[in-house]
Amino acid sequence: MKKSTVKAFCLIAGLAMAMSPGLAQAAGKTDGQRAATQTASEPAQPVAQDAAVAGDDGEVSINSATAEQLAAALNGVGLKKAQSIVSYREQYGPFTQIEQLQEVPGIGAALLQRNLARLKL
């Protein structure tokens, strides 16, 4: 194949990608990044707050919040640790003291101290 043919093909492909915003955004991204791009372009849906997450004070109830709510509200807690909190609560019943969070695997004193202002029973 001639170099001029390859150059022409590359030019046409580049122009096609430039004219298609969805393809240009997704080019060179992993599947996870593509999913994030697709969901980021969708309109945001209002999130209903319930008793688990308070409005202005930012406190989250460790006895009623979902794993997603815990992960969103707590510093240094991802979905995996948040799910551990929910699983612990389901297995042993509701927390009676906030300090009981340290009994959950992966939740130490430093993490608890960092989030005390964000927690409620």
Image (spheres, rainbow, N blue to C red):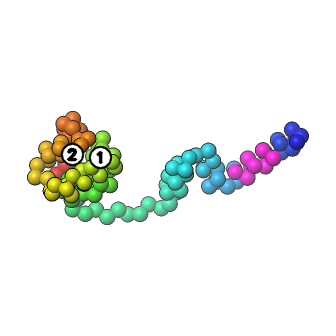
Q: Residue furthest front?
A: 91
Q: Give the range drawn in magenta.
A: 9-17
- Quarter the C terminus occupies: bottom left
Q: Nearer the viewer, residue 98 or 1?
A: 1
Q: Which secondary structure dominates the residues rendered in magenta?
A: helix
Q: Does the magenta stretch include residue 13?
A: yes
Mark with earlier residue (2, 1): 1
Q: Position of residue 115 (x, y in %)?
A: 22, 42
The structure residue drawn at horizontal position 86% and vertical position 38%, both measured from the top left corner, is 3
Left or right of 36: which side holds 78? left
Residue identified by numbered label 1: 81
Q: Secondary structure under badge 1?
A: helix
Q: Nearer the viewer, residue 16 or 71?
A: 71
Residue identified by numbered label 2: 104
Q: Crowding near pointer 1: few (<14 within 10 Å), some, many (20+)?
A: some
Q: Position of residue 14 (x, y in %)?
A: 73, 47
